[in-house]
Amino acid sequence: MLGARRAAIALTVLLASCLSWVIYLLLARAKLGSPTECFALAQVCVVLLAAPYLAAYTSRTEGDSVLLTLSRISTRRRLLMQLATSQMPLLCWAFLSTGFLFFSMELPFVKALQILAVLGIYSFSAGAVGMWGAKVFRDVLFSTEFAYLLWCATIGGMFLLAPLERYIDSVQPIIPLVLHANPLIAVCAILGETDIFRTPLLYELTPIPSYLFAYPPWYLVCFWQVFIGGICLLSLNKFAAAKPLKGTTKTWLT
């Protein structure tokens, strides 16, 4: 069991490292920021891509016996333990990759800790979405695709402002909502080396640079991700507590 877990961690670290390097090269080629910013953005992308799948796969393979228990308290604890177990390989990779960012790219220690905190928060929130999808769709791929659709909506909102600008006088009141919902903005707020919206690519694709705006604090961006993950966990807890396993008697704590 321990050997299998170590192998899973090693495989996850290897695959995540390869994926992050590919994304980093694409972001650097698109000139979306400094090398440090592109690497940190690649880290966030890997977490958002991998966390839902890991959580959904763990949820489906362990079965309903982990989710359906006799009391609300044990249900909540088991959900959190299952989520933490599923994200352990990804958290190991996040720690190692942030260490690389700190030592190789000379990122300040405080900012490295903030980046690591963002990756950890996103890992658990995205994992919660994956677990919720696994319970609703009862399929690992469908639940992962649902999570990807959610990230596309939150990240791609900035590109929808261009067609929306044709029908309203100003999109400036909407810009703060778009920035708070975009999980990538946390990295931009922490590093702040380059205004990503004034890079050549995004300057042409979104009208945000034409307006006055400020990046929201990184912890506020993370708060909305925690909110999404919390809603998913609460709904899972309610669902599990409401439907006990066959042959068991539902009991309530007093």
Image (tube, grey):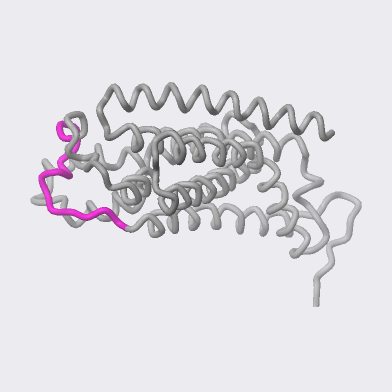
Q: Residue furthest right?
A: 247
Does residue 146 show up? no
Closest to the observer, 81 or 98:
98
- Residue 87 x, y percent position in the rendering: 63, 42
Whether 115 is among the magenta residues is no
**Identity of the residue drawn at 55% across and 44% down:** 123
**Identity of the residue drawn at 33% across and 32% down:** 35
Closest to the observer, 172 or 120:
120
**Left or right of 24 on screen, residue 147:** right
Quarter-of-image position of residue 30: top left
**Identity of the residue drawn at 65% across and 53% down:** 236
Does residue 158 show up? yes
- Residue 154 x, y percent position in the rendering: 37, 43
Magenta span: 203-216
Q: Residue furthest left?
A: 169
**Left or right of 241 on screen, residue 100:** left
Q: Residue furthest bottom?
A: 254
Split into 4 quadrants, where in the image is the C terminus?
A: bottom right
Quarter-of-image position of residue 200: top left
**Identity of the residue drawn at 57% across and 48% down:** 124
- Residue 94 x, y percent position in the rendering: 54, 39
Split into 4 quadrants, where in the image is the N terminus?
A: top right
Whether 204 is among the magenta residues is yes
Callout count: 0
